[in-house]
Amino acid sequence: MKFKRIFKWCYDKSKLYRGLYDAAGLKPEDIKTWDDVRKVPLLEKEHYREAQYKEPWPYGDSLCVPPKDVTIYHQTSGTTGQPVFQPDTWQDWEWWTECWSYILWAQGFRNTDRVFIPFGYNVFVAYWAGHYAAEKIGCEVVSGAMLNTEERILKMKELKATAFMATPTYVLGMADSCKKLDIDPKELGIKRILCAGEPGASVPSTKKRMEQAWGCDVYDHIGATEIGGWGFECSSKPGGIHVNEAMFLVELLDLETGETIEEPGKLGKVVITSFDRQAQPCVRFDSKDVAMWGEKCECGRTFRVLKGGIQGRIDHITKVKGVLFSPVSVEEVVRSMSQLGNEFELIVSREKDIDKITLRYELATGYEGQEKEVETQLARVLRLKTNLNYVYESCPYESLPRYQVKAKRFKDLRNEH
């Protein structure tokens, strides 16, 4: 049993994990059934933070191999706090690459593709594994690391790239930049785009915008620095994300009771175990993502599907005026309206003990002066979809921030008061 194997590895090799499991009264020989798996304590990102920044520097008690065996370093983006360091052995990195090979193959990437990666390679894992996996399945890979957006577009055109990888935000941003160069993105010959980093490629209206802009298929993928590339959309587009159950155990836990969810259509917290990562394992990691099981995919894979992909994050799903609110539901509405540009911001604040949500938006070019009509439509649709009212703020086109990696569109300012 793969879970029992990685549990024993962690217990024997990691001070961090042994401490968690001893506190819970669990030893490797206690893991015999699925019910025993559910007794294993959840791992939080904070556990890594507390274990690291000590000897062996900088991984501390989370490291399960001798430091000399670590060959690859990455770290989290730090969007939720102090970055977590992620060590990998060469074997771990080969595993990462294999995970991504599943993803690329399922989305139609083949050795006939010339894959452009418009990503500034740095300490974040981002598309590093995508690069290596594309090479592994025989693609020709072109790095656009040090180029700016316009230079990347021109290089894609010059080399006749057939595919690229980027966040949904940057996919839309590149399409806007094409217009400034008097280039139609659809004429560049891109056949497929792989997205990651944000839920946008699983949001129907955002996916539609990207596919219409580029004239090709857009696919989603889910992964994390601490976990690996654990989910992917296949070419059958089942309206969700396959879980790579050959390499990961993915559980959904009830948001209130913590009980395991097996039935489709019920939101739960995503908890993940990576079966084969050894330098810094990931066992029952609380990803803070929220998802629901869907129906079987027609592609023939037996891997289960998460309907609609990731529905949001626990730290972004919050109560506003007593109503459970997720920014993803607003993205679906904004991106469905042709009068609106690609960028927006959501700000939750509190005035005189009353919650207020401000939606800052940009009108698309050609719709100048239509703020009143747009806000009337937004108010009607958002009220139906979220059961909440909003304050609207029109911003000049291109005045809101543009992002190349993870966008930061949601701000909850209530805790600052």
Image (cartoon, grey):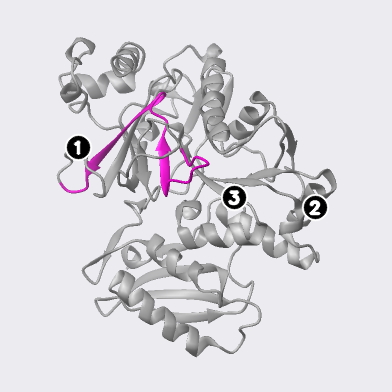
Kind of residue at badge 1:
Thr
| For residue 285, above or below residue 312 | above
Q: Earlier in the sequence, mark 1 or mark 2?
A: 2
Task: Name the residue tied to disc 2.
Answer: 151
The answer to whether one can see residue 135 in this image is yes
Q: Which mark is residue 317?
A: none
Local crowd size for mark 3, using a 10 Å CA cut-off: few (<14), some (14–19), many (≥20):
many
Q: Nearer the viewer, mark 1 or mark 3?
A: 3
**C-alpha gap between disc 1 and disc 3:** 34 Å
Q: Position of residue 64 (x, y in %)?
A: 41, 16
Q: Which mark is residue 260?
A: 1
Which span of residues is magenta-colored?
232-256
Q: Which mark is residue 217?
A: 3
**Left or right for 236, reference 164:** left
**Left or right for 256, reference 59:** left
**C-alpha gap between disc 1 and disc 2:** 49 Å
